[in-house]
Amino acid sequence: MQEVALESAINSIRVRFGSQALTRAAEMPPPQPWLSGTPVDRLTGIGGLPRGRLTLFTGSGTCGKLTLALSVLARATHEFAHAIVIDGGGFDPWTLPPYSPEPGALTVVRAPALEIAGEAATTLARAGAGFLLLMGSIPEHWLGPLESAANRSGTVVLGVVDAPDRALAHASSFSLGFSRAEWIWDRGQLVGLRASARCVKNRVAPPLGETELEICYRLGALSVTEASVEVAEMEPCVSAVV
Amino acid sequence: MRVCCGLTGHLELARRPDLYGAPVIVGRWDEHVVAASEETLPFGVTPGMAMRQAEHLCPQATFVLPDEEAVVRIRELISSALYDLAPVVEVRDEGVAWLDLNGVVSAGESIREARRRLLKAIGREPRLGLAPGPFSARLAAARARPGRLMQVDDASAFLAPLPSRELPLDPEQLERLDLLGLRTLGAVAAIGPRELESQLGCDGRHAVLLARGLEPDQLEAWRPPLFTSAHRQFGEPVEDREALLFVARALCGDLADELGLRGAGAKHVRVRLLFESAEFEKQEVIVRHPLSSTAELFGLIGSWIKSWQPRAPITELWIELPVLEGAGRRQLRLWAGGDGSSDEVTAAMERLQERFGDDVVWKPQLLLPIHGEVARRAGGAAPEGL
């Protein structure tokens, strides 16, 4: 009898305040990791980027967050049927070929307004897209539906922003702050940067961690004539010096 | 060709699951027996005999009047339940369900799922047969134990020792076969189609082809019906958008379950909000890509409701799907790798394009670096450097 009354009360709360207002613990399985193939996997504490959760790469200026995100995106194009970029501005697909993505799996959603970005991200996460790269923020009222949709479908959502607003920071489950330590030069040419990546929020596993990354820009085929053979053959684009 | 057959007993018997295990005879007085349960077989009762004779042979049986409409409903239920397990599904009133498994990636999984769904729909374990064609599959199923599968690889070898009474001929023709000494399917298969055609007409030719395992009959694919809807009437008129969204999601879930059972997708979606004054507002769209899952339906309808400004409190919410598409490509379970969600993402992208324009979603044509070219240039540059 009590169970019926409780069920009725839960339904009333959901009707009154929406289906997101109340979630049973049993409906929230622990996050499953997706191996991004980058040192970030170790920082999450679960061995990969959390599926069904929002991950943020933050940092001001040139600090390597976009380079790392592009590397993760390229990896996602090989592992998911759909890897989608929600482009609020700032995404240039021509920066991606050096990471050898699978072009058939990549789709870009151009969102001229934040509202469109929010709706697109939520719709695609709800439909079950494997990977979403958010280039920029989305409105606060879309964050709840996005979290919920991603949680149901297991979508990996990765956001790249300079400084997240309060709502976005609150909605994220794993947040990594980047700061550039120094540039890396090789024979007079800029080939990368050294950055520190600090986990500023982790809701999927303790503890918080910090690492230093050496991010080498991938030099495409057109640059080979100017670059040394060693650089052209260099396979990993991201290496970690912990 | 691979056909799976599930035998459940006549669908008239499925109307009364409470009588399973007891002798049951279905038919009208002064007419013929429509169906008889397995428990009446020892008494000599067979479908087609006079009811009075059946009553005389098995007086302890429960006699049930036939209900053709109920049988049609059960047949539709089973057909829709099996629809997404095979490209072609046929169900007959006699309690025979065929699934043409040609092209199905995981046939074993389809057969297991068919068994589970038939059990759920009928309430008793089906007998299953897997053979190159419908006729041999049916005979294989008849020889399997309940809940088990009999698999036949060589149809002609399997059919040869079986009695010729298994052929779909009328009693007079069967009697004639007996008089001709053709008492097994192997004997029927051994003579030429023309010889038997001269005796039994075109049925004779057909019988020889069946007995040889050549399977001249094709299955008639079941197709889902073309309209469905769901609605919710509110006790108190509703103004809260969240409440509408909650109800809409539940209705979308119900419709998606129904569409899933039918193996259909909605090509046309209409939402109506009814007010106390009996007036209503509606939104409708014909989508390019049929919608069939909760996510797809709610993705579209939820976006409407979020931006809808109804002029009065709402007393009733209707979601209608006037045009359904039963295309085979919506049989998501059959896809290699089970990548059904890929279809849903494509549909979601199309919906975004419908809402915000074609330019919103695009696939960049990337020119990937050619590693061979890199190596060649690197290799070519080395001698100069040296």
Image: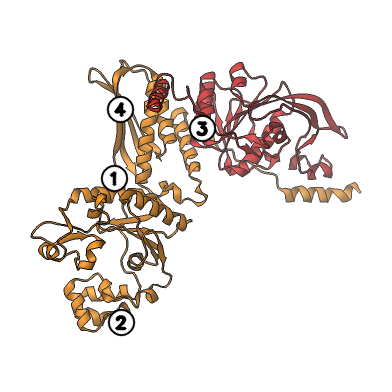
Chain colours: A red, B orange
Residue at image mark 3:
A26
Which mark lies nearer to you, 3 or 2?
Answer: 3
Closer-to-camera residue (A57/A234): A57
- Specify whether residue B259 is in view: yes
Marks 3 and 2 sit apart, C-alpha to C-alpha, by 64 Å
Of pointers 2 and 1, the one earlier in the residue sequence: 2
Report in which chain the residue with disc 4 lies.
Answer: B
Q: Which amino acid does label 2 sit on?
A: Ala
Q: Residues within 10 Å of mark 2 (few under 14, many from 20)?
A: some
Instruction: Name the element at disc 2.
Output: helix
Q: Residue furthest left?
A: B30
Numbered disc 1: what chain? Answer: B
Q: Name the residue under label 1.
A: B225
Q: Which image quarter: residue B88?
A: bottom left
Q: In this view of the protein, which residue sits in the foreground, A98 or B155?
A: B155
> CB under 8 Å between callouts 3 and 2?
no
Q: In front here: B377 or A175?
A: A175
Q: Do labels 4 and 2 share a chain?
A: yes
* Left/right of residue B299 with respect to residue B285 in the rendered view: right
For badge 3, the amino acid type reads Ala
Instruction: Give the residue at mark 2.
Output: B187
**Residue B232 bears which disc, if any?**
4
Indicate the position of residue A100 as horizontal and vertical percent values.
Answer: 68, 43
* Residue drawn at 74 percent across, 40 percent down: A220
Q: Which residue: 33% across, 48% down?
A: B80
Relative vertical location of residue B349 with respect to residue A201 in this rendering, above or below = below
Amino acid type, label 1: Pro
Q: State the SS at label 4.
A: strand
